[in-house]
Amino acid sequence: MLLLLQELLPHHQHINHFGGMKYLIINSFLVGLVSCFSQEAFATVPDTIIVGQDPRLEVLSQKQKIVNKKQSMMAGNGLYRGFRIQVISTNQRDQAFRIKAELLTNFPDHKSYIIYQSPNFKVRIGNFIKKEDAEMLKSQLNKFYPRGVYIVDDAVEYNPREDELNLQP
């Protein structure tokens, strides 16, 4: 750029790199001129990109979506984010084990749990991914335990079916 300016100015003038009003004016003019032409050149380029890819990439992409969906459902340690129904929270160990035995007798299809969080024993039942499913069992439990039965967020045991992970566009 400096050589171009030296050719444009008379030979007896010396250009200082940090000064000179003529240098600034000519430099600004040339920069503006170059930027106008470069914008015009880029404006004619189409906005279309064509990508050629191996068809196996689509299969790999679908498999990765399934893995991502499964991981987003997981809470850790092989358990999933879900719901359980808490039937009672008591500081009496014997009462907690008695309630758990009743749940096993009355609801054999659902697994029940005792969780000790000092000083209380909490009795919970079920492994639900959908809250609606937990609501149905809760309404049945309310017949046996009319007070204090509610749904809690918990890490649950669950094995997702293939159709639940299948992602169709």
Image (cartoon, rainbow, N blue to C red):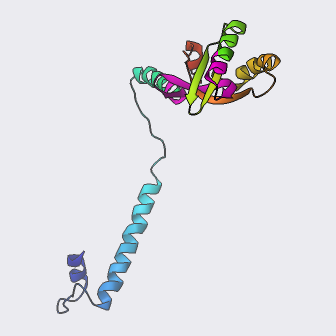
Residue 157 locus on image (x, y percent): 55, 18
As drawn, is 132 to the left or to the right of 18? right
Query: Which residue appears at 82% of the width and 17% of the height?
Result: 143
Q: Please indicate, yes or no, whether residue 125 appears anywhere in the rendered image.
A: no
Image quadrant in which you'd find residue 64: top left
Residue 152 locus on image (x, y percent): 66, 30
Find the residue positioned furthest to the bottom. 12
Query: Which residue appears at 69% of the width and 25% of the height?
Result: 88
Query: Which part of the image, by quadrant, shows the C terminus?
Result: top right
Task: Identify whether 152 is placed above or below 12.
Answer: above
Quick one: 47 or 143, which is closer to the camera?
143
Residue 119 locus on image (x, y percent): 59, 33
As drawn, is 19 to the left or to the right of 147? left
As drawn, is 8 to the left or to the right of 167? left
Task: Identify whether 7 is placed above or below 77.
Answer: below
Whether 77 is among the magenta residues is yes
Query: Which residue appears at 37% of the width and 69% of the height?
Result: 34
Quick one: 167 or 53, which is closer to the camera?
167
Query: Which part of the image, by quadrant, shows the N terminus?
Result: bottom left
Whether 92 is among the magenta residues is yes
Image quadrant in which you'd find residue 11: bottom left
Task: Identify whether 7 is placed above or below 153.
Answer: below
Residue 25 locus on image (x, y percent): 35, 85
Q: Which segment did they paint magenta?
A: 70-97
Query: Which residue appears at 46% of the width and 21% of the height?
Result: 63
As drawn, is 52 to the left or to the right of 122? left
